[in-house]
Amino acid sequence: SYVLTQPPSVSVAPGKTARISCGGNNIGSKGVHWYQQKPGQAPVVVICYDSDRPSGIPERFSGSSSGTTATLTISRVEAGDEADYYCQVWDSSSDHYVFGTGTKVTVL
Amino acid sequence: EVQLVESGGGLVQPGRSLRLSCAASGFTFGDYAMHWVRQGPGKGLEWVSGINWNSRSKDYADSVKGRFTISRDNAKNSLYLQMHTLRPEDTALYYCARDAMVAAPPGVGYFDHWGQGILVTVSS
């Protein structure tokens, strides 16, 4: 089965840049979507199709994907960005949607 | 405003059955594929099952295939998940989620709207 690997945690100071990786076999050939989940809340999509921002998502959120790694970048990090972040793709070989292992972002 | 409201969760003994429902409003329900995604206590997200707009295509995670059945009633704007032979490892918060793309084939879209989730606890 297709596996997406994320670092368990990322710590960043306010105003700095956080980068969250998502590793998977040939992930650059798939559409990657990113979700933010704050404690006690449902997930919210922050990036779709590698680098598109849905309506209402700040420009501080950006994404890229190539080869075996996709990356979510949060610029000028704010306290409100503290959350769990998950990447997600569609695995056509199994007809399954796959989520990454998740990364907890802590704002110092 | 898109709204998804899950119901039907609760405490159930291992081996028993449970049926979850998701009531949709604020959009043309019959135009969109729908999904169930779950999250075990302290764990990550796991896609469980998806159904396309006209019910002709249904997919399941390996962990639930043969035990869970997804269905929908477009006339009632409702999504369902029938769960049989429940196991302790099925304990989770179950989310109903909408596919972002209208009438899209599986895999094209992503999950653009989510309910608040309903808790299912499988324990004796």
Image: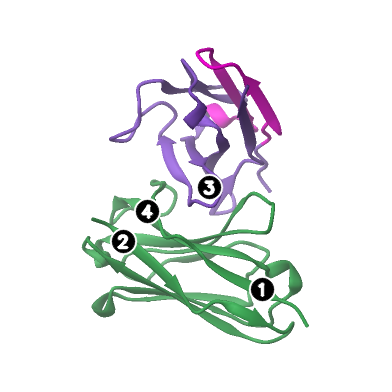
Location of residue B77 by image quarter? bottom left
Q: Chain A is drawn in which colour?
A: purple
Say whether residue B98 is left or right of residue A77: left
First along the sequence among labels 4 and 1 = 4
**The residue tagged with tag 1: helix, strand or loop?**
strand
Q: Which amino acid does label 3 sit on?
A: Ser
Q: Does the segment drawn in magenta span residue B65?
A: no
Location of residue A5 by image quarter? top right
Q: Colour of chain B?
A: green
> Residue B121's mark?
1
Label 1 CA crowd tier, 10 Å (few <14, some 14–19, many 20+):
many
Of all chains, the one bearing label 4 is: B
Spatial separation of the CA atoms under disc 1 and disc 3: 31 Å
Is B34 situated above or below B121?
A: above
> Residue B3's mark?
2
Q: What residue type is labelled 2?
A: Gln
Q: Are marks 1 and 3 on the same chain?
A: no
Of all chains, the one bearing label 3 is: A
Q: Which of marks 4 and 3 is in front?
A: 4
Write the start and end of the magenta stretch as one range: A5-28
**The residue tagged with tag 2: helix, strand or loop?**
strand
Residue at the disc numbered 4: B99
Location of residue B11 by image quarter? bottom right
Residue at the disc numbered 3: A92
Label 3 CA crowd tier, 10 Å (few <14, some 14–19, many 20+):
few
Instruction: State the residue at coordinates (56%, 46%).
Output: A39
Spatial separation of the CA atoms under disc 4 and disc 3: 16 Å
Of all chains, the one bearing label 1 is: B
